[in-house]
Image (cartoon, grey):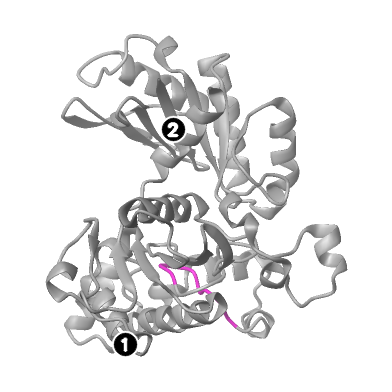
Amino acid sequence: MKILVINCGSSSLKYQLIDMDGEKVLCKGLCERIGMESSMITHEANGTKATTPAIFPTHTEAFAEVVKKMTTGAGKCINDVSEIDAIGHRVVHGGEKFKSSCLITDEVINTLRELSPLAPLHNPAGILGIEAARKVFGNIPMVAVFDTAFHSTMPPKAYMYAIPYEYYEKYGVRRYGFHGTSHRYVSGRMAELLGEMPHRLITCHLGNGSSLAAIKDGKVVDTSMGFTPLDGIIMGTRCGSIDPSIVSYIANLENLHERGMNRLLNNESGLLGVSGVSSDFRDVLEAAENGNERAQLAADMLEYQLVKLIGSYAAALGGVDAILFTGGIGENAMGLREQVMHDLAYLGVTADLAANNSRGEEVRISGADSKVEVWVVPTNEEIMIARDTAELIK
């Protein structure tokens, strides 16, 4: 069985073709600048990788080029699209309507449109991808896999906000959580590594966007992202949790309206806003090592907020048996992981510094005498989407 995994943005299209027999990636790639000048496609297959210019007025033309790359030339990995058994789409927001992956129907698409106000940057792009895929691939079955679904097990005391209840009833204002596909993959992988699901697990997905999840017996009881992916800890360009009154205070002083404030909090804050250097944690660390005090402050804020949130989730879980790092920062920032483990010594955490001296590897980094197991597990959201898709079309 071959599954095409799709992740659409408003101007981008990421894809992977996976042979479920052995879960082998046959090809993968990225279409960029869809609807703009200087569009391009990067396609990788058969040990070759090439970036070529293209013309992508819409996602439909991008999908057509993906088909061309998969079926011709050096990057050929199938003879015809009829070899693709199903297509799995990443959809960011399922609201309260979708608590698990589902086959895509006209009714599902209409419901996704209704949910678009909850994720105005992401869901419309996902719908564009689904509709374009239908035009290019015809009647191949398609499945929607939702970022929010894994967090649907949170109890009301964790997902409700202390605002008038009517706004939950009328507009669905509540904590939803995101990165659910990643948290689900790494927690499942943790269960495989240990032979059983840890009773009390904290997963830390750290990247340009970051979130933590408190997981009890395989079910999420709390997560750091909220109504939108802006909530939680400091991120690349997102502020994370702040006093809500700061929004109106700055808006009044700077004469900023909704769009301007959204840009400030989502695109100009976080590591970038504090450091003044970059949204990339590697650049921030390099600047800090060269004596940049604001960059050091940004790095310190991330580590401090991580330790604080892990501590609060340990309290919510009644203790913690395992902590897991994943994502671009989680898998590669050795110094950050070491400092977090040092600051969690009160929980009985000890570090294996030799094991921690690794990047992007699946490894236990806590000491043999540690009361809490600490692991690094590289995430793989694409294989999670492919597995759900294969399971549903069976």
- Residue at (28%, 13%) from the top-left corner? 72
Q: Quadrant of residue 131?
A: top right
SS assignment at label 1: helix
Residue 168 vertical placement versus 301 (above, below): above
- Residue at (74%, 38%) from the top-left corner? 111
Query: Does 166 sit left or right of 12 as displayed?
Result: right
Q: Residues within 10 Å of mark 1 (few under 14, many from 20)?
A: some
Residue 136 vertical placement versus 263 (above, below): above
Question: Which amino acid type corresponds to the residue marked 1 in the rendered image?
Answer: Ala
- Residue at (72%, 51%) from the top-left corner? 96
Residue 258 in the image: state x and y as whole percent.
Answer: 68, 67
* Residue that label 2 marks: 5
Question: Which amino acid type corresponds to the residue marked 2 in the rendered image?
Answer: Val
> In terms of sequence position, does the residue under pointer 2 or pointer 1 come before the other?
2
Q: Main secondary structure of the magenta part?
A: loop
SS assignment at label 2: strand
State the residue in front, 54 or 107: 107
Residue 240 in the magenta stretch? The answer is: yes
Residue 68 in the magenta stretch? The answer is: no
State the residue in front, 139 or 99: 99
Q: Residues within 10 Å of mark 2 (few under 14, many from 20)?
A: many
**Residue 178 has which mark?**
none
Q: Is residue 263 visible?
A: yes
Residue 224 in the image: state x and y as whole percent.
Answer: 54, 70
Residue numbers of the magenta segment: 235-242
State the residue in front, 278 or 25: 25
* Residue that label 1 marks: 345
